[in-house]
Image (cartoon, rainbow, N blue to C red):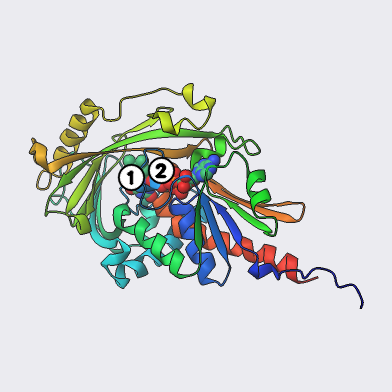
Amino acid sequence: MEHQPPEQKPFAQRPVVILGAGIIGCAAARQLLRSGFSVVLVAEYLPGDQHVQYASAWAGAAWHAAGGITPDHRYIQAVSHRIMLRMAQDGPETGVSVVNAREYLEKEPAPDSAIWGKTVVSKFRQMNPGEYPAHFNSAWAYETLVTDPTIHMPYLRKEITSLGGCFVRQHVDSLQQLYDMFPESRVFLNASGWGSKNLTDVKDDNCFPERGQNVLLATDKCNTMYFRNGQEYTYVIPRPLSKGVVLGGVKQPGNVYVTPESLWNANLTSLCRSPEIDLSIAQDEIARAHRLAPEIVPEHPAADRISHIVGIRPSRKGGFRLDSERKGDRTVVSAYGFGGGGYAFSYGIADAVVKMVETAERENVIV
Ligand SMILES: Cc1cc2nc3c(=O)[nH]c(=O)nc-3n(C[C@H](O)[C@H](O)[C@H](O)COP(=O)(O)OP(=O)(O)OC[C@H]3O[C@@H](n4cnc5c(N)ncnc54)[C@H](O)[C@@H]3O)c2cc1C
């Protein structure tokens, strides 16, 4: 009998392997599965976990048009909005809600300001003087989207699993470790957040941790977002599905709270440590949020209405990385470094990732 070579698995049946199961890895997994690809996610922290280094558990998470970004990045945010609006319409189990927004501007908006967002959000209008505090230059009212990560991440886990995706809880030291675990796979997505700083074959020194700390105030007045646009970084982000509002914010570059079990490697020990909750930050956030939205945030909220959120944003000097590289017979897509905007970019990034994976598919199947 003639010798038969071992059967080659068709490209689409070889799983796309995703490193990272935060909002970026999970959103990409969902979109890839919906396009018919097979997907495996490998990550140390999975949806439902609440580790300080797992940023996706802690986000606000509001859709707010970012200022000072390129038209391509605006479009990514616009795609996210399109997909997440549909989720909001699908029902509360998705964790995404439509809320009112009031954005107060400290000064005249620059041409590359967040104003571009008026083409994406609903019911945008310039507010009239008298509708907002007189010391602001101007104000916008519109409808936007908020995502409750305590509902959305478990929802995504369920969605991914029911679409046939699977999760593997594992820490890896390198992408090579993944290649060895999945020798048949041809496409790998690195969605490891600031983990990319320490992967031995990535070592992206532009990645840095940026500590965030918010106050979560329990209240029924949770249908309007307030955002101060300018030098002062203050917001009140509603979580209508959890009956609360998130008060912020603060960014602390290079500051990470390190627990013994999270000492992935020696590099972390050189980073600044901080206690998990800094009460002076919390008090300052309450005071600023009270000034911005006194009808929602009392000057002295009762202690039993308050809890705290601390999370490490996966930031990157020069902005996030989104690209696809051919490495031998593998394609490696990178999508990390989303800092304080991972939710606002999430599903647009997922859409871009699907297109990159389809390009790799075409290169593999059209010979
Ligand atoms: C307080 C706070 C408020 C925020 N508010 C907003 C907001 O209003 N709007 C908004 O859009 N964004 C907001 N963000 C930002 C948002 O949370 C992040 O941008 C987003 O969660 C990043 O997602 P990610 O998937 O890239 O990273 P992460 O959620 O950090 O996930 C990284 C994944 O990679 C895995 N991983 C990393 N390295 C390894 C390794 N070596 N081996 C195995 N697994 C690994 C991790 O286990 C994890 O699963 C906020 C963040 C914070 C902290």
Kindly tell me whether mark 1's CB lies below 8 Å from ligand 1.
yes
> Of helix, strand and loop, which one carries label 2?
loop
Residues tagged 2 and 1 counted as in contact (Cβ below 8 A): yes
Instruction: Please provide percent x and percent y for residue 294.
Output: 11, 43
Which residue in the structure is indicated by mark 2?
Answer: 54
Residue in the picture at 39% in, 64% down: 158
> Label 1 sits on what residue type?
Trp
Kindly tell me whether mark 2's CB lies below 8 Å from ligand 1.
yes
Residue in the picture at 47% in, 38% down: 315
Residue in the picture at 30% in, 53% down: 150
Q: Residue furthest bottom?
A: 1
Residue in the picture at 16% in, 50% down: 129
> Label 2 sits on what residue type?
Tyr
Left/right placement of residue 86 relative to residue 358 reads: left
Instruction: Please provide percent x and percent y for residue 177.
Output: 64, 44
Q: Is residue 356 visible?
A: yes
State which quadrant residue 11 falls in.
bottom right
- Label 2 vs label 1: CA separation? 8 Å
Left/right placement of residue 273 relative to residue 137 reads: right
Which residue in the structure is indicated by mark 1?
Answer: 58
| Screen quadrant of the N terminus | bottom right
> Of helix, strand and loop, which one carries label 1?
loop
State which quadrant residue 210 falls in.
top left
